[in-house]
Image: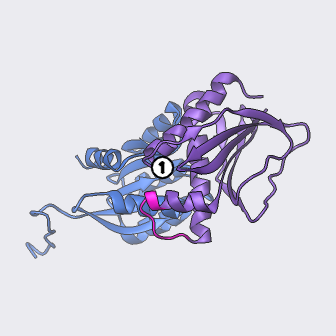
Chain colours: A purple, B blue
Amino acid sequence: MLYEQELKTFVEGTTNFFEVAAQQPASIGSPYLMEGSPAVHEYTGVINISGKREGVVYFTASKAMLTVLLMKMQENDFSHETMKDLVGEVANTISGNARRDFGRDFVISVPSVLSGEKPQIPQKPGVRSFIIPINWRSHSAKLIVSLT
Amino acid sequence: MRNGKAVAKNGGKRTLKLMIVDDSNIMRRRIERSQRFEQLELVGTAGNGLEALELFKKTDPDVVTMDITMPQMDGIECIARLVAMKPAVRILVVSALADKATAVEAMERGANGFLNKPFTDRQLNEAIAELMR
């Protein structure tokens, strides 16, 4: 269960990432709640959360968005490995920044990455996730937060 | 050469050796690319704390940038081990972990500065400048 102030933490973390790292703000859509496995893009960074709260935070984005993001970050390596690196790093940054409000007992894992045409994110039955839609330079991404 | 010691460029300032530790290749390249100090010479990069320890022994850096959340050995443990090996090493933590307790713990283990991700080039260079003062 995610409370309104906690949701705000993730929204602010996401906007801050794009403003600072990508030097161009993203627009955040209205977060919504869903049960089951949300649809994801080609690359998904996964951070497992443990400690005071448990669950998972995902950042999912298309190859196209990640390519432009890499260019904005002055990268010229657009390989599969670099895409995985970036999506993991974004998930890690947003989750780590959330500790400003959640505290150090919000323990974040090293990122793992899912990729492929239609990757499935594992989801426990009955668990609901908050989906935070992100739009950046006409590309869509999502931050998915699933916490108990 | 002067008195048997190599004289660095940069108006006689000694060149300092830099090691970058982060499990993200992108972040390692970013720090390497963004730092603006002629005085700093990159001697190596490592992807986790264990690699950092090995590289540290081989290259003897003066300045280290250190991520915290890494596989195999995290940055907090690595900081303590590096400082034990070389108390004069200057370590800048570069981490997404934004809680004060982590920053305090890193400093207590021997880090000299803390920079949160995401950061601008300016913030990185200011943090490094502060470290080298």
The answer to whether B131 is drawn above or below residue A77 in the figure is: above
**In the foreground, A48 or A135:** A135
Q: Quadrant of the N terminus of chain A?
A: top right
In the rendered structure, the answer to whether residue A12 lies left or right of residue A61 reads: left
Outermost residue to the right: A125
Q: Residue A20's spot in the image, x, y percent?
A: 44, 44
Q: Residue A128's spot in the image, x, y percent?
A: 82, 35
Q: Secondary structure at mark 1?
A: helix
In the rendered structure, the answer to whether residue B124 lies left or right of residue A26 reads: left
**In the foreground, B60 or B42:** B42
Chain that bears disc 1: B
- Point 39% across, 58% down: residue: B31
Q: Is residue A75 magenta?
A: yes
Q: Main secondary structure of the magenta part?
A: loop
User: What are the residue bounds of the magenta stretch?
Assistant: A71-78
Q: Is residue B31 magenta?
A: no
The answer to whether A37 is drawn above or below residue A2 in the figure is: below
Q: Label 1, on which residue? A: B80
